[in-house]
Amino acid sequence: MLLVFGLAGGRDAANRPVMGALASRAADFFVISSDAYPARPRVRRGYALVLMAVLFWFALAPMALDWWTVFAPGHILIAGALAAAGVGHLIILRQVRMLGAAVVGVALLLIAGSHAWILIRVAGPSAPGTTTALAFSLVLYLIAALGMQLMTFEDMTLELRRTNRRLEAAQGKLRRMVITDPLTGCRNRRFFEEIIGRELQRHRRYGIPMSLLFVDVDRFKAVNDTLGHDAGDRVLREVAAFLLSNIREADYVFRWGGDEFLILLSCGEEEARRRGTALQQDFARYSSAASLPTGVGLSMGCAEVREDSEDVMALIKVADERMYENKRAQRRNGPATTPVRVSRTRSARL
């Protein structure tokens, strides 16, 4: 960019036209650099042809005409290009808040102003005042160069932040896929194994009651055998949607396997029993509204996690056994009418 000075104060008359052409092209590259952020610059073939024509004009016009034919147009082109580049960098500042863009934009606008001042106040390339204008422009070019370095650093930092956000989003998506059952949208056993230790610690430290509610879908095998697996998948999705919409945010619903679900409740045994019975009765109405196959219902069994409980899997087995007791009782007495039975003796031993 120091070739710009040749246009205004170069002492070698033979080199002034070429220097002027190169200086105007250098100013155009500032415009391209502002246009290049944050994508590739839009440089077309027609633009290159115009640049070539300008280069020929600066090289040949002084031979046939006077030096003024390149002096005035050169300063006008350079001032216009630098002003456009300065505005372009200020637009970048408005979009991404980069300090380097502000430094470059202001410096380029001031350099454009110096070229306009030379055109208006200086009579020719060797007139008094040219040296002062060139020194002022040199300082501004150095400031613009530092601003571009700062802008490059800020751009790299911004891109790293964007990449980190994309990685975090991808990791979050991958984690959700790992801990979520793809069919029902419930948490899976992997997530249960991950959080149960933390929940037990919270249960013991703060005395928060905790119970396990084991849920099984009645007549699920018959639905699969008679209506097909698509119908069975729909039943599982509807059951999961019902359970997720009828528990508190502090509780968890896990798909335990097949047509079995496990609910981790923040309540005692009696409350878990009442909530299990309410879920059975509500699901009887929900299954009719959702047009599920006849006979599809829920069987449930619960077990309380006491403060001294160590083996959670043993408690899940207890809840599973009580679920089968509930299922047999429903077959004898009718669905959605039998309370979820609890055996206090065995639960106390665990």
Image (tube, helix red, strand yellow):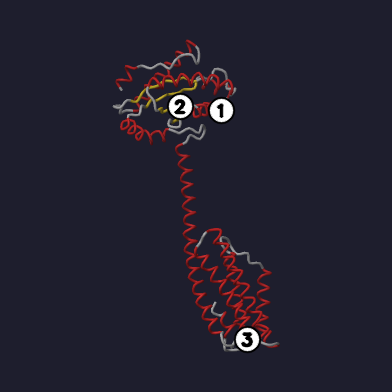
Pick the front one: 297 or 203: 203
* Residue under the image location 41 percent in, 27 percent down: 265
Disc 3: which residue: 123
Disc 2 on helix, strand or loop? strand
- In the rendered image, the vertical position of residue 117 relative to residue 256, given as above or below: below
* Three-letter residue code for mark 1: Arg
Labels 3 and 1 touching (C-beta < 8 A): no
Q: Report x, y in % for residue 150.
A: 47, 66
Q: Splitting the image into 4 quarters, where does residue 295 fall?
A: top right
User: Residue 234: which disc?
Assistant: 1
* Three-letter residue code for mark 3: Ala
Nearer-N-terminus badge (1/2): 1
Nearer-N-terminus badge (3/2): 3
Q: Distance between the residues labelled 3 and 1?
A: 87 Å
- In the rendered image, the vertical position of residue 133 relative to residue 232, given as above or below: below
Disc 2: which residue: 261
